Image: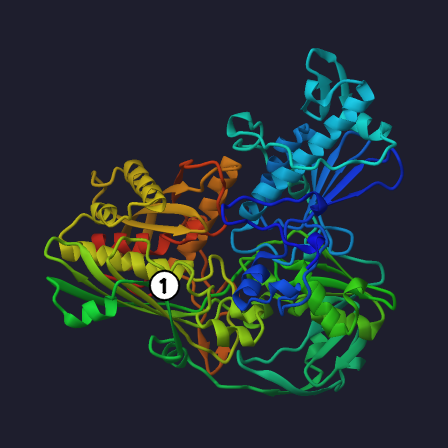
Amino acid sequence: MSQAATPQFKDRKGCWRLSRRSFLIGAATAGTGLFLGWRFGVPALRLQMAAMFDSAESGSTGFGEVDTRPNAWFAITPDNRATIHIPKIEMGQGIHTALAQIAADELEVDWALLTVALANTADGPNDGSGTTGSMSVTSLWTPLREVAATMRQMLVNAAAEQLGVPAGQLTAHNSTVFVQSEPDRVLTYGEIVAARTAAWEVPEEAPPLKTPDQYRYIGQALPRVDFQEKLTGRARYGFDMRLDGMLYGAAAYPNTVAGRITAASPGSAAAEPGVVTVLAEADFAGVAAESRVLAEAALGKLAVEYEDGPLLNMADIQQTVTVGNGKATIIQREGDANGALAQDTFAQTHLAEYRTPLAAHAHLEPQAALVDVRADQVEAWVSTQMPELVRETLAEALGRELEEIKVYSTYIGGGFGRKAGMEVAVEAARLSRAAGRPVHVGWNRAKEFRAGYLRPPTHHILKAGLSADGRIQALDHQQASADVAYLFLPAFFPILAGADFGATRGARLTYDIPNLRTVAWRTELPFPTGWWRGLGLLANIFAIESFVDELAELAGADPLAFRLAHLPESTMGQRLRGVLERVAEMADWGGGLPAGHAHGLAVSADAGTMVAQIAEVSLEGETPRIHKVHCAIDPGLPINPDGVVAQTQGAIIMGLGSTLFEEITIENGRITNSNFDTYRLMTMKETPAIDVAIIRSGDDPYGMGEPPIGPIAAAVANGLYTATGQRLRTLPLHP
């Protein structure tokens, strides 16, 4: 692997290695501006897999060639504006604002002069890892600051030449560079780049980064950079995209979850009003028409044969996704939990099992893509979390070279992992190729629920032994799940790796227990399951934290004190203690509550972020009511506190819906609840007050999009048990 292609990932000391050759500089002509691109490594997931299979040395991971294009572009133009192009997709989580704050601080630009632009896959930066896993800020934190600081230093050095003053006597501030002893001698960044005629030089080493006390934007609750576009309706989502002369496409899908097309012919669809193109192939049948309504109506006139697959019912699915079925992988082991529990020498033992159901993503914007297939290139506007993967998928589906495919990312109206799917882009591409015109495909709500993939169900069996003094001496967690991450990986990967790392997110216990084992059972369903917000986090924490509450009761201990007593003496343990003690203070744990109300507690660690939640609940008739949720969250360094609060509240609301209502039901192989009238979500009326306290525990940020969803189901279940004496171990919670 050449030096230019060598990934600049973290070394053993946790420091980023950013080499001078990682930068690309471009300017069309002298004085047009400074354009700086940088590369900080191949996608994280591919690096992990490459390391696992020890093939990175050759430059090929077995998952496609390593892409050496830059991961981001910075630009300073003569009008003194700064633009950063980063391919992290904005889907309501505020990522563009957070990344802008990070860049603006080190670049020393005027906040009002900074723009974050959506990148595309052709002229913009590369990002094969997509926007998933609460990794955007964490992965870009150091390299983004380093490239911004480098660009700032390049501007200072250029100003030094123009002003005839040593660079060490200059200071960059607010999109200007001034002489420290003569503040009136000042150049704007725009003036510097406009006057530059010589080639730009990258410093040999990245300049020192700011210390936290020097931050101007990082840590501030700045307004979202996308507010104006969204408030005025100018923001463009995948469903909004239009081109002159475009058609609307629709594709046929089987009515069963495990079904597939076995044969297709045009039937009489071509004669239907407004139909322009009919495409019927061995595995695909669709139409392109002058309107979406006409396209959907014509689908029924296609002659399509289906194989239904297994006509599953809920009992069949539950029987499949059961501990003991499938392939087992030990993912956590301390001491000998199995041996200790087999001896049964403890003062008390306890066993319990828990289940979580199939669930939909239920995002507001359904799948949507506009694709224009032409002889020389293919352009696609897609509501996707994975633009690079869309590009690769379209190239394969159309038999085209990657260089011919250009994917434009749009704003996303909710993703939660479902917008990592490629189906809608491929449908639009195939129909566009057949029609010779751009085609927009936008799924309706029923198709959104019935096609594609769902959150998998899970099954958990936990067993523990307590000593006479009430400490956990051994704990065994057996977890079964259908696939989460493997849907997007090569077929050989599960064979070699065993447990699905997405399904096991949150499954490893964070308590100090001398004998501990976590076993993941990979079970396979005959229909696709995949990403969901937090992957397996909510399900695993629901089981673990409910069980910990049961153990606390068995030990005769307060649930808070019991957790605190079992925390490890480590940095993570200290941070968990911090959020537990803070949330207890917020909720006045142990204090008085209205009659019939009770508190439930749960805690989790995910993506480097610690979260503790207390839910105040009651039971009105047979209906659980959530009156208030207190949440203490430690994300390390909060880049934008308002963003942290918003992400926390959103995750809790989504988690509450999953706790109380959400469940996909299947009868005879067919999904029975495929719209919002039959698939219950949390409503505004039912949403409780959510109080969030942020604890800053360090100088590095951690993930925020998913960690807050982890504890909420267990917190509610634990509270309902305290209020009613009824232990509920299956989601959604039905007393």
x and y, in percent, of residue 290 in the image: 79, 68
Q: Which residue is mark 1?
A: 732
Quarter holding residue 206: top right
The reply to whether residue 726 is visible in this rendering is: no
Residue shown at 42%/57% (left/top)? 657
Tag count: 1
Q: Is residue 595 left or right of residue 100?
A: left
Residue shown at 40%/39% (left/top)? 692
Front residue of 703 and 366? 703
| Label 1 CA crowd tier, 10 Å (few <14, some 14–19, many 20+) | many
Quadrant placement of the N terminus: bottom right
Q: Is residue 387 left or right of residue 483?
A: right
Quarter holding residue 85: top right
Q: Is residue 317 left or right of residue 275?
A: left
Q: Is residue 540 left or right of residue 347?
A: right
Q: Is residue 322 above or below residue 383?
A: below
x and y, in percent, of residue 122 in the image: 77, 56
x and y, in percent, of residue 539 in the image: 38, 62
x and y, in percent, of residue 239 in the image: 68, 58
The reply to whether residue 375 is visible in this rendering is: yes
Q: Looking at the picture, which amino acid does disc 1 mark? A: Pro
Front residue of 438 and 182? 182
